[in-house]
Image (spheres, helix red, strand yellow):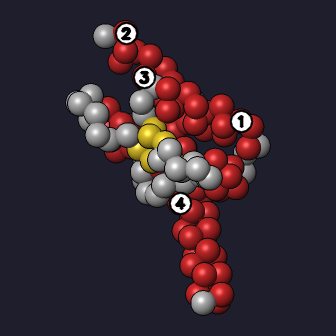
């Protein structure tokens, strides 16, 4: 039971929930998360470390750069997916984060297409 409490405690921060919401849609680096969330990189690093330590995020382990995604492979009864499912569709922060994620991906794909 204490593991569940600790995992919930690690997720119980607005910025960490936003990170989980974004990582449910894409593998993202700390720099990408910081840009999308408009947060200092140092703060994002702290949040990502806590989430990874609680097994809510998984690090690709490929250097450089490390990318993170939801750790849905655990036998935790679907806690990570439940947290994502609880994000309200009409939440302004979540909507804005997803719009920034999409814009970031669009600009990257346009840059790749232009350099090809």
Relative to the observer, which residue lies in front, 77 or 91? 77
Q: Earlier in the sequence, mark 1 or mark 2?
A: 2
Q: Which mark is residue 67?
A: none
The residue lying at 29 percent from left, 40 percent from top is 73
If you read the primary sequence from the N terminus, does the residue marked by circle 2 or circle 3 appear first?
2
Q: Residues within 10 Å of mark 2 (few under 14, many from 20)?
A: few
Secondary structure state at the residue bearing disc 3: helix
Give the spatial CA distance, label 2 vs label 3: 9 Å
Estimate the x, y position of residue 61 in percent, counting from the top left: 50, 44
Which residue corresponds to mark 1? Answer: 43
Q: CA distance from mark 3 to mark 4?
A: 24 Å
Residue 33 is at least partly visible in this image = no
Q: x and y percent of residue 111 in the render?
A: 65, 81
Q: Nearer the viewer, mark 4 or mark 1?
A: 1
Quadrant (top left, top right, bottom left, bottom right) of the C terminus: bottom right
Element carrying mark 1: helix
For mark 4, give the secondary structure. Answer: helix
Residues 104 and 90: in front is 104
The span from disc 1 to disc 3 (Cα, nearest Å) is: 19 Å
Residue 7, numbered circle: 3
């Amino acid at each position: 039971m204490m593991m569940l409490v600790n995992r919930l405690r690690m997720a119980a921060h607005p910025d960490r929930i936003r990170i989980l919401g974004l990582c449910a849609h894409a593998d993202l680096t700390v720099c990408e998360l910081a840009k999308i969330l408009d947060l200092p990189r140092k703060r994002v690093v702290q949040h990502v470390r806590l989430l990874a330590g609680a097994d809510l995020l998984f690090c690709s382990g490929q250097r450089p750069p490390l990318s993170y995604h939801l750790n849905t492979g655990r036998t935790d009864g679907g806690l990570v997916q439940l947290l994502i499912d609880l994000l309200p569709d009409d939440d302004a922060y979540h909507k804005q984060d997803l719009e920034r994620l999409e814009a970031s991906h669009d600009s990257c794909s346009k840059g790749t297409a232009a350099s090809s």
